[in-house]
Amino acid sequence: MFDSYNRQIQYLRVSVTDRCNFRCAYCMPAQGVKMLSHDEILSYEEFLRIIRILSNHGVKKIRLTGGEPLIRKGIIQFIRDITALQTITDISMTTNGSLLAAMAGKLKAAGLTRVNISLDTINPKLFRQITRGGDLVQTLQGIEAALAVGLTPVKLNIVLTNMITEQDIAYFVDFIHREPVSVRFIEYMPIGESATGPGPSIEEIKTMINSFGRGKLKPTIDICGNGPAKYYNLPQAKGSFGFITPISEHFCGVCNRIRLTADGKFKPCLLSNQEIDVKTALRNGASDDEIAELFYQTIAKKPQGHTLTNPDEPTQFFRKMSQIGG
């Protein structure tokens, strides 16, 4: 499957729930967002049917997101069911890690390949502030459990807000020397309302890393797949650093993903209000071919690039990041 700009589409991000046990300051308002009703959310059976159909049209990689995917009951059996299709070669998950310690072994046994875990600071007070109530210890325990059971490569996602500190960077430099993790710094995206602001630039983070006396960053190959991060090693480190630049050096030209929201909408681009309703077709008895045709329509609408750096384009979206599997 190729889109209008010759990008091969083989990756589906599936938001299995709009609910989350965190209220991250850059993701949603402090009061949260209006939750969808049970009937508005796709069932696991509906998700599985869509995945099965799309796996026959080029999709080989699935990433489960939320909200927080681990708070939805039945997630382990759902992963087993995707694995049983035998047409999906990679099943990964993005999580805040707070529930991962108790579930990591079962997730691995069910067929989950790897995890991305959000960790925007290692300062407990700032962590509670950013997540509005999250417990840093639980997330750190989740990271340890993921490493222990082999959900690798474990990737840590750090959004560069104005709350990140030099102590955080020093911790991550030490961490990749001790553990085979990939620590990925993500540029802050100015999308809609947020209780945080932008933090250091990617170049400032690189300079900081190079200043700790543990050697200089050197480019290396992608850790897994053809994702948006550019990876770097430090001498004698077990892990690596990744840098994701949606603003300063956007990677739209190699984007290979389509999103499926919890309420059954295909999204051709995260940073767009375009959506195609697959749930209504599904529940009105659409055939496999008709579902596939909606996927083709979504791919055809995939834009060449986002418009966040265009001052004439709005940056307000009618959904929060937590509602679309950001």
Image: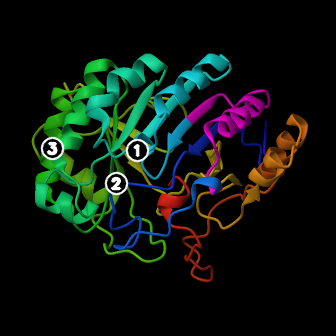
Q: Nearer the viewer, residue 201 or 111?
A: 111
For marks 3 and 2, give the one nearer the viewer. Answer: 2
Q: Please name the residue that numbered disc 3 is placed on.
A: 137
Q: Nearer the viewer, residue 116 or 246?
A: 116
- Residue 201 horizontal/vertical position (percent): 32, 62
Q: How far is disc 3 from disc 2 in space, using C-alphas?
A: 15 Å
Question: Which segment did they paint magenta?
Answer: 40-62
Q: Could you tell me if residue 279 is visible in this image?
A: yes
Is the Cβ of the residue at disc 3 closer than 8 Å to that at disc 2? Answer: no
Residue 165 position by quadrant: bottom left
Q: Which mark is residue 71?
A: 1
- Residue 104 horizontal/vertical position (percent): 33, 27
Q: How far is disc 1 from disc 3 in space, using C-alphas?
A: 18 Å
Q: Amino acid at mark 1?
A: Ile
Is the Cβ of the residue at disc 1 closer than 8 Å to that at disc 2? Answer: yes
Q: Is residue 121 left or right of residue 22?
A: left
- Residue 38 horizontal/vertical position (percent): 58, 54
Q: Is residue 308 left or right of residue 223?
A: right
Q: Mark 3 or 2 closer to N-term? A: 2
Q: Secondary structure at mark 3?
A: helix
Q: Nearer the viewer, residue 194 or 51?
A: 51
Q: Mark 1 or 2 closer to N-term? A: 2
Q: Please name the residue that numbered disc 2 is placed on.
A: 21
Q: Amino acid at mark 3?
A: Val
